[in-house]
Image (spheres, rainbow, N blue to C red):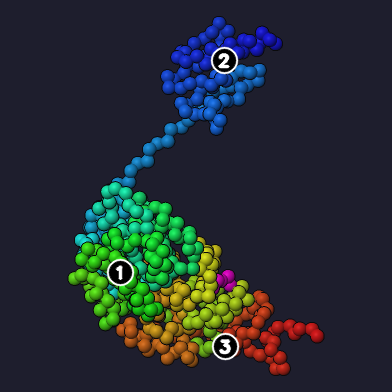
Amino acid sequence: MRKFIQKALKRIANIARPGREEKTNPGGKHFINQPPDAKADAGGVLVSQGETSPAGRPRRRRTGKGGRVGATEPAATVAMPEVPWRLSQFKVAPLEGKTRFHDFALPDALMHAISDLGFQYCTPIQAEILPCALSGKDASGRAQTGTGKTAAFLITVITRMLNNPLQGSRRPGTPRVLVLAPTRELVMQITAEAIQLAKYTDLKVIAVFGGMDYEKQRRQLVDLPVDIMVATPGRLLDFQQRQDLNLSKTEVIIIDEADRMLDMGFIPDVRKIIHSTPPKERRQTLLFSATLTEAITRLAAQWTKDPVTVEIKPEQVAVDTVDQIVYIVTTDKKFALLYNIIKKENLERVLIFCNRRDEVNRLAEILTRYGIDNAELSGEVPQKQRIQRLEQFKLGKIRVLVATDVAGRGIHIEGMNHVINFTLPHDPEDYVHRIGRTGRAGAAGTSISFADEADAFYISPIEEFMGRKLSCIEPDDTWLVLPRPLVAKRRRIPPGMPGGELRKGGAKEAGQRPRRR
């Protein structure tokens, strides 16, 4: 046994000698030819230079039975270098009356992202605003949601930063581009789109809004330099007051949905923010609004310098891309019609709007009782839950989302073909914003509205606002038949909703088993 071990050790020692060529020894065994840039460990196994164990010793390979070195491991596969993306891979044929993104000489990294998103031709507002915005001019645009305005201003600022990279280091919390939006949901939507468009660049995009962890957002600001910041006015001012944010180097400021800013009372905050940025002569300003009222026009004149004005009329959004249906139905039959539309049309992802939070709560409860998976989205839902529910809805894990106007304004979901107005909004602009959740950026969509005894009065103002008549029809009688609920009612539902009728002598729902005494 001792002789056998000595022979084995001698064989291992011979293998470990560097520079040995492969040859046969008298016993017929082969030595291994070692590459000049490799070394052997104590067990005779070849290891790449620098490949060591966590303790700093070269890594060993297990030996075979009797101490013999096992078969050599297969050579490591060499990863092939990625083939760089070329603009020639993104082919879009010229089309009369259409503007391609190729026509603007955008950076290849940005065009790569545009190609991934499937964008080929510009929407009307993109075709009109990109030429002047890319040249550095200020602009104000009248555009509803769903027109592609977000992509228009993001393409502008990403192109600007890629073509004009900053030299040297920058202080954290000093964004080059600031985007102001009135709601958290809109901030999240813009941020998500910015990340998609900048994914082949080194640009850093962050979102700042209320309702989320303050310190977590603060760490994003103070750890690394920021290129694009998307924010609501209130939370941004909080960071400014703590001196975590410096807007003196801002190159571009974008104000989105300025009319909603005005309605929600954010204009004084916006004034403070704009005052802390460079003068309008030394920055580019882009302002977008669904309506260009006299008040918005005055604000645009104060904050911009010789702006180019672009107008996309609301009817272009509503009429051209969304099929609008209005059902004339009584209050007590509205849910039966809703249930049958979802079930018989086999709708997989539906956004339903109500005017008030209590209506959202009641409708969500009844949908659950009838076995339709749903979630609520209103101002009383905590922000983290709202984000989670939106993500689940986008992934198809939630079939129906019931929302109020404020909560649903910033929702942008690909492939959502149906929006239902369970109650018609009192403001015609809110109607356009609601149906703008579908049929976005030229895609087809369907809007269904219910007009009962009270809501019918709002049809005429909506038609006047859009400049066209709405198609009002009565549903088939079979669509007004409601099956029995799967789950018994737990709390009283007011009349008008199914199960809201009261029994004589008690507050029990018809069909519900009476409580034993």
Residue holding disc 3? 496
Quick one: label 3, few (<14), some, or many (20+) residues within 10 Å? some
* Measured Cα–Cα span from mark 2 to mark 1: 75 Å
Q: Which of marks 1 and 2 precedes in the sequence? A: 2
Q: Number of marks in the image?
A: 3
Quick one: label 2, few (<14), some, or many (20+) residues within 10 Å? some
Residue holding disc 2? 12
Task: Name the amino acid type tagged 2.
Answer: Ile
Q: Is residue 181 left or right of residue 312?
A: right
Q: Which residues are magenta?
A: 372-376
Residue holding disc 1? 274
* Majority secondary structure of magenta residues: strand
Cβ–Cβ below 8 Å for labels 2 and 1?
no
Q: Nearer the viewer, mark 3 or mark 1?
A: 1
Task: Give the residue drawn at x 29%, y 65%.
Answer: 277
Task: Give the residue drawn at x 62%, y 80%.
Answer: 483
Where is the C terminus found, in terms of image quarters?
Answer: bottom right
**Is residue 407 in view from this perspective?**
yes
Q: Which of 314 and 176 lies nearest the eye of the viewer? A: 176
